[in-house]
Image (cartoon, rainbow, N blue to C red):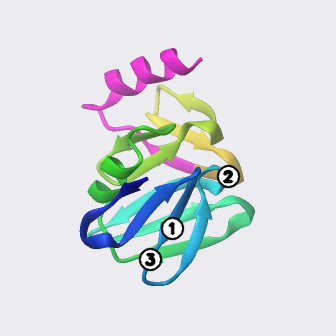
Amino acid sequence: METSSQHFCEISREKIYFLRTKKIIPLHEIIMIQGDINYSLIYLKGGRKTLVPRTLKLFESLLENYNFLRTHRGFIINCDHLLRIDRLHEEAFLTNNLQASISRRRRAEVSKRLQLIA
């Protein structure tokens, strides 16, 4: 069981448990997490969204041992939902018609990680 800062959430049995709100989200349901200053918008299957008052950095460290990848300062994607990458425009296309930018500095890391997955 992995716990985030100040006991906000924890991961157990492939689910993320938000302790204060008692919300449970299976990791396979998460398509992408988009950061906006001190908030994170979690995009889920079926077009649902959840806003959480935590930074992407917290989620990056919490999900590093799972199939999630930080592609940009503002995005973490679930590689299981990745459809394709447009290398010309540096975009990752995901299920539910979602797109995440790939930053110039993270391009090599993204390519390397995706080759390991494929």
The residue at which mark 3 appears reads as 19
Instruction: Give me the residue at 68% from left, 47% from top.
Output: 95
**Element at label 1:** strand
Counting residues from the N terminus, which is met first, the one under dot 3 or under dot 2? 3
- Tell me the kind of residue under disc 3: Leu
**Element at label 2:** helix
Give left or right: position of 37 versus 48: left
Give left or right: position of 110 versus 32: left
Instruction: Give me the residue at 53% from left, 81% from top.
Output: 22
Instruction: In the displayed orientation, state which residue is furthest to the front.
Output: 1
Give left or right: position of 116 versus 96: left
* Gap between marks 2 and 1 measured at Cα: 26 Å
How many marks the image carries: the answer is 3
| Residue segment shown in magenta | 99-118
Verify whether residue 35 appears in magenta.
no
Image depth: mark 3 or mark 2 in front: 3
- Indicate which disc residue 97 carries: 2
The residue at which mark 1 appears reads as 17
